[in-house]
Image: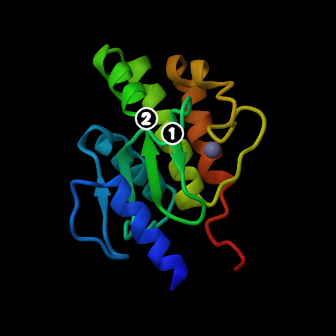
Amino acid sequence: MKHLIGYLLIVGALSSCVDFLDEYHYFVTPELLPFVKLFYTESQKRGFDLPTDGLSVSLYHYRNGDAGDSFNGSLIIVLDPDFVHRNLATGYRGDSLWVEWVVFHELGHGLLYRDHCAGESIMNPHNEHINEYSSNVAARQRMINELFTNCHIYPNK
Ligand SMILES: [Zn+2]
C-alpha cells in the first residue's frame, strides 16, 4: 500500500492536467504521441503485445540536465519540455529523431525492462550513437532492432 501511495503522489505531481488517476490510467502528452505510437507499432511488428495501462509520458523539469527520465519499476516517464520543444521546433527530421531516441530509451526501461548497455544501442546511457541514429536510416533500423531483440520482456520476479 505504501508503494501505491507513492505512485499516486508522483503521478499527481507530474500530471497536473489529469484529475482522475488509477492503475489503468493512460496519458501521453500530444507532442510525444507520434513517438509513443511508433514504439508500439515497432513492438507489434515483432510480436509483442505491450500493455498501455498505467503509462504516463509527459513533459516535466524533473532533473536538471537530463532530456528524459523514468521511475524504476513504473511506467511513468518524463521528458524535459525545453529539449522536446527545441528539437521539434526546427522542423528537421534529424532533430525530431533525437526526441524519438529519448522516448524509445525511456520506454525501453519501462516497457521492455532494458537496462543501460554499452555500444551501439538506444540504451547506451551516454547517447554515443544518437548522431548516427538521427542521420543514418540503416543505423537507426539496427538500433531499433537491437532495442527489441535484447529486451527482457518477461522478467523473473
Ligand atoms: Zn536510461
120 to the left or right of 94 = right
The structure's colour scheme is: rainbow
Instruction: Name which residue lies at 24% across and 43% down.
Output: 30
Mark pair 1, 2: CA separation: 6 Å
Residue 67 in percent (x, y) is at: 51, 33
Quarter location, residue 97: top left
Q: Compared to 71, does 4 lie above or below?
A: below
The residue that label 2 is drawn on is 80
Q: Are marks 1 and 2 in contact (CB under 8 Å)?
A: yes
Indicate the secondary structure of the residue bearing disc 1.
strand
Quarter location, residue 89: top left
Q: Which quarter of the rendered picture does the C terminus lie within?
A: bottom right
Q: Compared to 86, does 62 lie above or below?
A: below
Q: Compared to 113, does 32 lie above or below?
A: above
Residue 98 in percent (x, y) is at: 48, 26
Amino acid type of the residue that numbered disc 2 sits on in the rendered structure: Asp
Crowdedness near tag 2: few (<14), some (14–19) or many (≥20) residues, C-alpha within 10 Å: many
Instruction: Name which residue lies at 59% across and 24% down.
Output: 130
Crowdedness near tag 1: few (<14), some (14–19) or many (≥20) residues, C-alpha within 10 Å: many
Q: Residue 19 carries which label?
A: none
Q: Give the number of marks.
A: 2
Q: Residue 68 carries which label?
A: 1
Q: Is mark 1 within 8 Å of ligand 1?
A: yes
